[in-house]
């Protein structure tokens, strides 16, 4: 951005947007932990499929910058 010292290819987020991204990644990490716990506890393939789908949706959402 000209005159700001910020590179032209930078992405500028508000504090709220940055917090929202962190929250989405936290939710995805929790879902990954849920899968690990389910495997350790002998979850059924159906349960693991459901948990995997949840993780996939959360990861897709986490990719969103705004």
Image (spheres, rainbow, N blue to C red):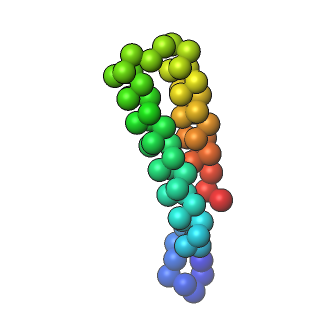
Relative to 13, is 33 above or below?
above
Q: Residue furthest right?
A: 66
Residue 43, by quadrant, is top left
Outermost residue toward the front? Answer: 41
Q: Nearer the viewer, residue 24 or 60?
A: 24
Counting labels gives 0
Extreme residue toward the left, this view: 40
The structure residue drawn at horizontal position 61% and vertical position 56%, both measured from the top left corner, is: 65
Q: Is residue 18 left or right of residue 61?
A: left
Quadrant in the picture for the N terminus: bottom right
- Name of the residue lying farthest toward the top: 45
Along the viewing direction, whichever of 13 and 2 lies nearer the viewer: 13
Considering depth in this image, is 63 or 48 the residue closer to the camera?
48
Residue 33 in the image: x percent, y percent? 40, 36
Task: Give how far across and how far down residue 25 sits, in percent.
Answer: 50, 49
Residue at 51% from the left image edge and 13% from the top image edge: 45
Left or right: where 50 falls relative to 29: right
Q: Quadrant of the C terminus?
A: bottom right
Residue 56, how many percent across, how many down?
A: 57, 33
Point 50% across, 82% down: residue? 5
Residue 36 at x, y percent in the picture: 38, 29
Q: Is residue 31 above or below residue 15?
A: above
Answer yes or no: is residue 47 visible. Answer: yes
Q: At x 55% / y 51%, what residue is drawn?
A: 24
Can residue 9 be seen here? The reply is no
């Amino acid at each position: 951005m000209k005159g700001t010292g910020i590179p032209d290819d930078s992405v500028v987020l508000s504090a709220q947007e940055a917090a929202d991204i962190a929250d989405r990644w936290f939710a995805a990490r929790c879902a990954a932990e849920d899968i690990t716990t389910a495997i350790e506890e002998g979850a059924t393939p159906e349960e693991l499929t459901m948990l995997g789908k949840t993780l996939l949706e959360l990861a897709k959402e986490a990719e969103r910058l705004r």
